[in-house]
Every structure is written in C-alpha cells, then in structure tokens.
Image (cartoon, helix red, strand yellow):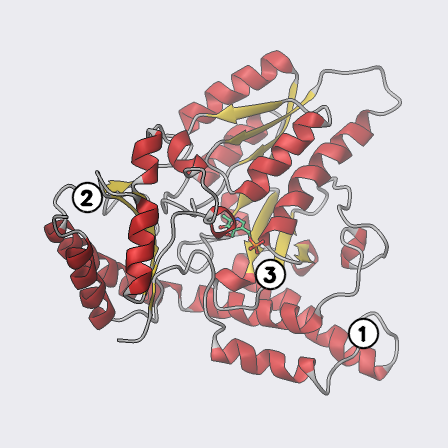
Amino acid sequence: MPAVYLDHNATTPLDPRVARAMTPFLSEWFGNPHSPHETGRTARAAVEDAREETARALACDPDEVIFTSGGTEADNLALRGVMLAARQACDGRAPGPPLVLVTSGAEHPAVVETAQALAREGFPLVAAACSHTGAVTVAALEEALDRAAEIGQPALVSLMLANNETGALSPARELAALAHSRGALFHTDAVQALGKAEVSFRNVAADLLSISAHKIGGPKGAGALLVKRGTPLIPAITGGTQERGLRGGTVNVPAVVGLGEAVALAVRERAANEARVAALAYRLLERASRAAPAMRVNGPTAGGARLAGTWNLRFPGWSGEEMLVRLDLRGVHVSLGAACHSMAARPSHVLLAMGLSEEEARSSVRFSLGPANTEEEMDYVADVLEEVLSPR
Ligand code: PLP
C-alpha cells in the first residue's frame, strides 16, 4: 500500500485542475499585473478574475478581497491592521480607555502569537474560555467581553470558524453579532473551515475573514483576507499601492490564479466532499475504536458541530509522538497538531486550552482526511492501529 496521507489540515496535494490554471502564468504569461502595457494587462486580468471568483464563492464583493501570502499573513493583517488603525483614530484626542483585543487560547498560532505581540505593544489581551470541544460559546464570549470592558474598550474579537486541531465549528454568526453589540469588530480565521463547512462572508457578518489556498488543493504561499468595505485597517506590509494600499508588493500572479480556482472548486464540491469524507471517517473510527476501546475523541463527537474529516484522538497510556513514528514507519502520515508546532516538544496548546492534562494532550494524535482518501486506506490504517496498539 502506498503511503496513506491523513494530514490534510497541514496541507493538501495541489489539485491538477488548479495546477493547469496556474501553469501559463509560470511561463508565457509572466507579466507584472501593475504594468500598463498588454503583457501587464494580461496578468492583471487574471488577478482580477481570481478576485471575482473568490468573491463569488465566499459571498463578498471583489474589492473586499485582499490577496496575501497565506493564512498567517491574513491573520496578522487582520489583528495588527485593526488594532493599529483603532489606535491611530484615537491619536491627537484626549487619552481614552485602552483598546482591548479578545481572542481564545485555542486559536492558530498565527492569531495567538500575533495577539501576544500586540499585548506587548500596549493592547491588553483578553482570552475567552474555550469549551471542551475547542470552540468558544456565546456565553464564554459574553463573559470575556465583560472582562474586556472592565479594562477598556473591546476593539476586535478574533475567533476561528473551525478549529484546526479538533474540527470544532464555532457559532460564528452569533459571536460576530455579540462582538458588534459591544462595539468591537469581528475577525474569523476560516482557513480550515473553507471547503469543509459553509463559509459565507455575508452570512457570518464578519468584518474580516482569513483563508489559505494550500488547505484546499491550492498552492502554498497564497491566501486572502476578506475586509468588509469601510473597515479601518493599517497595512502590515508597506511599500506599494497594490491591494488597495493594504498589502505592498507585486502580486504573486500564479499563486493568486491558483487560489481563485481552488476556492471556486472547494465551494462548488464541498457537499459531495463532505459526505465522502464523513463516510470514510466513520469507517475508520468504528474500526479504530474496536482496536482500541480506550480511545477517546478530543473535540465534538460524531454528529456534533464539527468538520467531518478532522479527528483528534486520544490513546490513554500511549505517547502520541511514539504513535506518530510507528504509524509513519508503516506509511501512515498523521500529526500531533498544527504543522508549525508539530516538531515542538510542547503538547498542543489547543488541547491544553480545552482543559486536557499535559499527559492527555501528549497521548493524542490528529487524523485529518481528504476527499481523495479511500475505503481501502481506512481499512489499512485501522489494521495498522490494531498492530501498533496491540499489548506491548
Ligand atoms: N489558520 C489556521 C486555522 C490554520 O490551520 C493555518 C495552517 O495550518 C493557518 C492559519 C496558516 O495558514 P498558512 O499556512 O497559509 O500561513
């Protein structure tokens, strides 16, 4: 059996249809989209087509799409952009209350670490408690906003749409409405939700929303921040008027073309992919729980508010790291959590934020499925788990 890839939340293979769309822009159509001549205009038309495609798929206007180098940059632009703009708006006036950023401990490091950096720059940070599934409830945000209001003015709430480690979906629409009712803007990281759950900028009524291409069959190094028209934002990268002055630098045309194609395909094929991935996941879970009766799900259980293909499983008495190695030796590729931290000795910050002990977090492994996985692969992985977990 060739390697079985169950780490789709880390990255996905490039969809051949996306590769085909990108190829001409890696060779003959090489123009700078900001040049005035025909070579430039060809590239510019492709960038604008990708912007329209992205906007149509995600229910926003094309001029609300700001292309970035990926999800991490989109999250940075959202958090830094809003907080610095809010501070700038206060400049010159009598000192007002501190501007507070509200997020949770279960966010991706792109949000957690940016929020911590902003805290060091004078923006107090309040963490909303996350539930045992990895999502933040409306009640938990309400409590966090009360605490934020005691410190100053809540300026921005940033809470993800789907958790990358547990697959928990958040009630984003309700969270956004609550943030707005307290005078704060709302950002959601939809990097893992896209292609796996409904992502509609209008329906969520967010002010800012991050996406990334390589999680949905697109190229690495491409993403976007959706920015509701009129949202005050300071650019994170200066040095040009590209992307409405919010992101300086020559646009990466092949990557943006790939992003547009990948977003359109992910949204169009979501329902079919979701059904397929759910059936595969239940097949694997059913057999895995027979092989390891002590196995537990970290996050929402089957049928809960969750992504169909993201399963964080805990194997009491086992080391997740050791399991990862043993599975790898048998050609099964899984992870311990976010790829950017998977080599770290620290246990997952998401699992700890959910209330798991260090030991429980260390005995957990993430399986993230994709639509190209097969039933045979699931049966093979279940056999491997049975072998790996047989009494030592
Ligand atoms: N946000 C979430 C929820 C993610 O899972 C990831 C990637 O793992 C990112 C942001 C970062 O995206 P990128 O790799 O495009 O920078």
Q: Is residue 34 left or right of residue 325?
A: right
Q: Would residue 309 be visible to someone looking at this image?
A: no
Residue 41 is situated, as x and y percent measured from the top left of the image, at 80, 78
The residue under the point 80% across, 60% down is 249
Describe residue 91's horizontal placement relative to residue 246 as left or right: right
Is residue 20 or residue 352 the one in the foreground? 352
Q: Amino acid at mark 2?
A: Met
Eyeballing the image, is 141 above or below 59?
above
Q: Residue at x 52, y 33 (%)?
A: 177
Question: What x and y, as percent, mark residue 214?
Answer: 52, 63
| Residue 124 location (% of width, % of height) | 65, 22
Q: Counting residues from the N terminus, which is met first, the one under dot 1 or under dot 2?
A: 1
Calculate the distance from the C-alpha at mark 1 to the C-alpha at mark 2. Answer: 53 Å
**Residue highlighted by disc 1:** 32
Answer with the quarter of the image where residue 139 lies: top left
Q: Which residue is mark 2?
A: 295
Q: Where, by quadrant of the figure, is residue 77 drawn?
A: top right
User: Where does the N terminus fall, quadrant-wise?
Assistant: bottom left
Residue 109 place in picture, x, y as percent: 54, 41
**Could you say whether the residue bearing mark 2 is in a helix, strand or loop?**
loop
User: Mark 2 CB in 8 Å range of ligand 1?
Assistant: no
Q: CA distance from mark 2 to mark 3?
A: 42 Å
Residue pointed to by mark 3: 55
Residue closest to the eye, 317 or 285: 317
Q: Which comes before the other along the chain, label 2 or label 3?
A: 3
**From the viewer's perspective, is 141 left or right of 301?**
right
Label 2 or label 3, whichever lies nearer to me, is 2
Q: Callout 2 environment at 10 Å: few (<14), some (14 to 19), or many (20+)?
A: some
Residue depicted at x 61% and y 56% = 70
